[in-house]
Amino acid sequence: MALADLQATRAFAVLTLDGRKWLLPQAEIQALESLLDIDREVRIPHSVGAVAFAGEWWPVYCLSGELQLLQRPPDGRRACPLLDNGADRFGLVCDQVETLTVAPRLLAPPACMALPDSPIQALVLLNDELGCVTTTEHLAALLAAVVENVDG
Amino acid sequence: MAESAAWVLALDHQLRAAVGEREMAHLIEAPTLLEVPRSPFYCWQVLVWNETVLPAMDLAAWLRGQPMQRQQPLAGVFAYQTRPGADPEYGALLLSGIPTRTRVDDDQVCALPKQPSSWQTLAISCFRQGDQPIPILDLPYIFSGGLL
């Protein structure tokens, strides 16, 4: 999903990870589960377990606020949104998940800050804080790259 | 002999650089800097200015190849054009002191400092002020992603 498509998106969910706010299109949040719903015995490599939803196991991953892969959820993680863009499906343990009631004004990330593998597609000012806009597709690509690095 | 005005910028306690007089738009003392995850070590914060976000570039960190601790940050907002006639774009540089205005003559031109060697990436020219060479920054290159 390109910046132009994101700018047409009206509803965003705010996923808080270690205090950092990551925004995803609300339409990509398929369900919101509790951490208690994660079956930690279902071991999918690099996941913290899986959630049974709609007749399938959805792998659940844990990322830091900087989107580094974590082996176990830090204290404070309470929610597990299930992300689905039609191609990628997984859960992400978060501190908190909220829905923005007003469509945010998306700002293009400065060109001099955009590392080639950055999942950040836009920035948003949320009162005195900064939110980073990404998508399930970009998170899935980041997870795939991280897993490849860990395994490689 | 052509003479023009410039601002001399303190990038840190030692490194100096210059920009054209009209390139500096604003100076912000104790700016509110917001961190952007997964960004380069020399440009990992933005500041809010005129309802948009500007990259806060630490050129001293880039030149020295490592992050810098800044006690009392000061940020200059600079305008640049990526091509003639284009609308101005803006970026911020982290500074260690209030910029000083100077006048530069053609006969002050000199070679870039040998160290750090990466000056040649950042600078379009250089002039001498007293004993010190002052590189002139290539702002469009710096803020358009040339350092990535």
Image: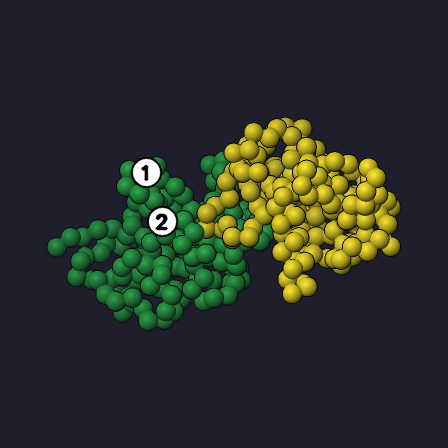
Where, quadrant-wise, is the N terminus of chain A in this rendering?
Answer: top right
Residue denoted by label 1: B86
Which chain can be seen in green? Answer: B
Residue A8 visible here = yes
Where, quadrant-wise, is the C terminus of chain A in this rendering?
Answer: bottom right
SS label for mark 2: helix
Do pointers 1 and 2 mark residues of a single chain?
A: yes
Q: Is residue B8 above or below residue A91?
A: below
Type of amino acid at the residue the image marks with label 1 = Ala
Residue shown at 19% from the left, 57% from the top: B105
Q: Give the image location of residue B32, x and y in percent.
A: 54, 46
Q: Foreground: A136 or A12?
A: A136
Numbered mark located on residue B42 in the image:
none
Residue denoted by label 2: B140
Q: Foreground: B89 or A115?
A: A115
Type of amino acid at the residue the image marks with label 2 = Pro
**Mark sitting earlier along the chain (1/2):** 1
Q: Which residue lies furthest to the left in this view?
A: B1
Residue shown at 37% from the left, 52% from the top: B141
The hue of chain A in the figure is yellow
Residue B30 visible here = no
Chain letter for mark 1? B
Residue shown at 34% from the left, 37% from the top: B87
Q: Is residue A13 above or below residue B141?
A: above
Q: Give the image location of residue B114, x and y in percent.
A: 33, 71
Q: In this view, does A28 lie above or below B40?
A: above
